[in-house]
């Protein structure tokens, strides 16, 4: 997935009057779909009441990619919108980082 700055995810919706929030959802949804997550079209997010279901499906897609809880990203984004999305983006960035063990964890055979 594309690494995005969590600060940009936080500040850009304020600067664009909420438009970047929809853009972020749509782009992240596209990246989740490319990794076989089942997330419906972003147009459903615009429909009242249906947007709650859509946000749950979006969170389930994030859960599928990261291997973490579905409820955490849902609650963060539902209650805090772009503030919660900041934490979700940080989690997505961390999930894509390759694991490199610390130098002290390396085992050398002699």
Image: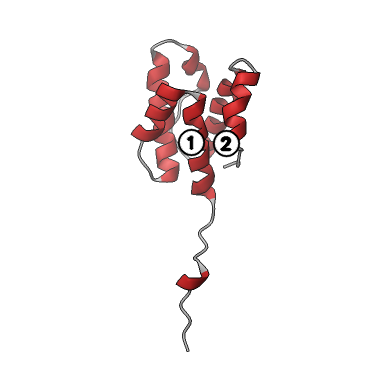
> Which residue is drawn at the image coordinates 40% and 15% (left, top)?
50
Residue 51 sits above or below residue 109 on the image: above
Relative image position of residue 106 (x, y in whole percent)? 48, 74
Viewer-proximal residue among 28 and 9? 9
Relative image position of residue 40 (x, y in whole percent)? 46, 25
| Helix, strand or loop for disc 2 | helix
> Which residue is drawn at the image coordinates 53% and 48% (left, top)?
96
The quadrant the N terminus occupies is: top right
> Which residue is drawn at the image coordinates 46% and 11% (left, top)?
47
Looking at marks 2 and 1 on the same chain, the residue that comes earlier in the sequence is marked by 2
Asked where in the image residue 66 lies, by quadrant, the reply is top left
CA gap between label 2 and label 1 equals 7 Å
Q: Is residue 107 visible?
A: yes
Q: Residue furthest right?
A: 15
The disc placed on residue 6 is 2
Q: Is residue 35 visible?
A: no
Q: Is residue 9 left or right of residue 110?
A: right
| Helix, strand or loop for disc 1 | helix
The disc placed on residue 87 is 1
Is disc 2 in contact with disc 1, using a CB cutoff of under 8 Å?
yes
Q: Please say which color scheme the image uses.
A: secondary structure
Viewer-proximal residue among 91 and 24? 91
Residue 63 sits above or below residue 82 on the image: below
Viewer-proximal residue among 99 and 39? 99
For label 2, count other residues whose C-alpha is less than 10 Å away and answer few (under 14), some (14-19) or many (20+).
some
Relative image position of residue 6 (x, y in whole percent)? 57, 36
């Amino acid at each position: 997935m594309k690494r995005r700055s969590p600060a940009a995810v936080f500040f850009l919706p304020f600067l664009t009057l909420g438009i970047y929030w929809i853009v972020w959802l749509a782009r992240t949804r596209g990246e989740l779909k490319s990794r076989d997550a089942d997330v419906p079209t972003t147009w459903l997010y615009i429909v009242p009441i249906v947007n709650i279901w859509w946000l749950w499906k979006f969170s389930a897609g994030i859960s599928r990619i990261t291997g973490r809880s579905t409820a955490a990203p849902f609650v963060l984004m539902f209650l805090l919108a772009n503030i919660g999305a900041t934490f979700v983006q940080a989690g997505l960035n961390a999930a894509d980082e390759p694991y490199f063990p610390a130098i002290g964890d390396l085992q050398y055979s002699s």
